[in-house]
Amino acid sequence: MRAPLTPALALLLLTPLATACGAEASGADGGSAKTVTVNVGYQSKTINTVTAGTLLRSLGYFEEELAARGKRDGVTYKVDWQDYATGAPITAQMTAGKIDIGSMGDFPLLINAARGKELRQPTRLVSVTGYNLRGGLNTVVTAPDSKLESLADLRGKKVSTSVGSAADGTLVRALQRAGIDPDQGIQKLNQQPSVGASALQAGSADALSQFVAWPGQLAFEGKAKALYDGAELNLPTFHGVTVREKFAAGRPGVLDDFLRAQRRATEYLRSRPVAAAESVAKETGLPAEVVYLYNGAGGIATFDPALRPELIEALKQDLPVLKDAKLVGDVDVDAFVDPEPLGRLAAAGGPAYPAATAARPELWLKGEAATKTYDSPRELLRAVRGAQVRAAYVPDAVTGTLWFADRAVWVAEGTELRAFVTAAGARAYAGQHQGSGARIVSWAEATGIAG
């Protein structure tokens, strides 16, 4: 008697057929069709990916590059942009041959590599969108009136996250450092970001661990406060672009066009950060002030397509976390990373971006098309008083993570003022500097001390 066909085996058997049909219809994998549709998966509200997604789509740069190619080779190119909330469904569609190019976070990228190999649809990491070398793109937040004060307080509590995401990786590592078993020490709720945000507000979750831009959005709207700054891990986190190997081999010129368009979008964001934030806000419905927190001139994310060695090394450090969770087996990270496409663009000339620099206090006034930076938090607070403020940003005194100044926790030390993303960070600093009179003060007190 024949053994029943398991869902996994069925998917494995159907994947080549689905891919072949798609390639025959569109020529996406290198066929001779006169119309080629390039399928791009992106996450509109994961604004660390905008140079390969939301901003790129709104600027039309990829379509422009493809139109120029079409004139040269007599092919009509179309782009099908597919928007998802997380990286997991993008990987599912890529392994089914239905998405050619996708963008996602570091932990999902490893799952992308693993699933691609398992299902005979291998993928390759070809560029980075945005990164933070300390891990500040992920944050654990609680309700504004929560009595939770540190990670230690999460023991036995309900914590919402998206399992397999970069935010889940941050949660797991942070709990381990706090001496809490991430599997047994908390009640983990595996939820989409929007569901988790609703659960936090409804009180059915005690905390939410999520990636950009959910923590910032909830804090900006007064619906959450930061409990843990991912930058405390001091481990890089980033988002990147992955491509199906068959597509890259069959349409290398189209991949080059995508990366060239991504580089143009990166240049636009870096040279016109306020305009870029306004554009992304319009496309996503996110507040522009939140977009700028992450994507601004000194934002939490640094945008650069380069496959920096420290980011690739971070992928290798991420792998054991996913293996322990039994989400992946062995992944050959070096084989997954493909520097050749970016290398082709570099050979043709283009900008080389500097590494991230320390963020400075920054003020965005209402009606202004540009922001102003300051040398110290005290100078920022002086400028805030009596001004029509759209948003004021200040870096954490220890981690450097940029945060909303009026949502930060402030410490006064004589006439000096320091801001912290979390109350735990502020308490730790004040406790270490009691001799110099360091004390936690309110936002109103801080602005008063600034003079």
Image (cartoon, helix red, strand yellow):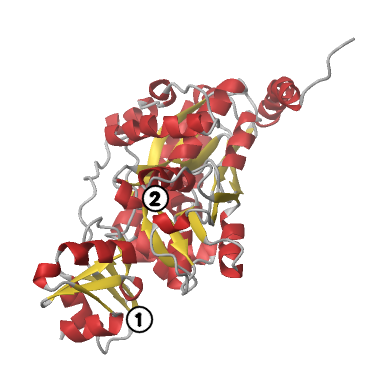
Identity of the residue drawn at 51% across and 52% down: 57
Answer with left or right where residue 248 lies relative to residue 442: right
Question: At numbered mark 1, what does the secondary structure look like: helix, strand or loop?
Answer: loop
Dot 2, how many residues are within 10 Å of its Cα: few (below 14), some (14-19), or many (20+)? many
Residue drawn at the location 60% of the way across and 52% of the way down: 192
- Inter-mark Cα distance, 2 to 1: 26 Å
> Which residue occupies the foreground of this view, 48 or 204?
204
Which of the marked residues, 2 or 1, is nearer the chain's N terminus?
2
Specify the amino acid type for callout 1.
Answer: Lys
* Residue 353 occupies quadrant: top left
Q: Residue at x 55, y 30 (%)?
A: 326
Question: What secondary structure is marked by label 2?
Answer: helix
- Give the residue type at disc 2: Ala
Instruction: In the rendered structure, find residue 445 and report the number of the disc placed on it.
Output: none
Q: Nearer the viewer, residue 187 or 376?
A: 187
Vertical arrangement, residue 257 with respect to residue 159, above or below: above
Percent x, y of residue 141: 45, 61
Tell whether 367 sits left or right of 85.
left
Residue marked by disc 2:
265
Foreground residue among 411 and 270? 411
Q: Is residue 152 left or right of residue 27?
A: left
Disc 1: which residue: 366
Q: Quadrant of the C terminus?
A: bottom left
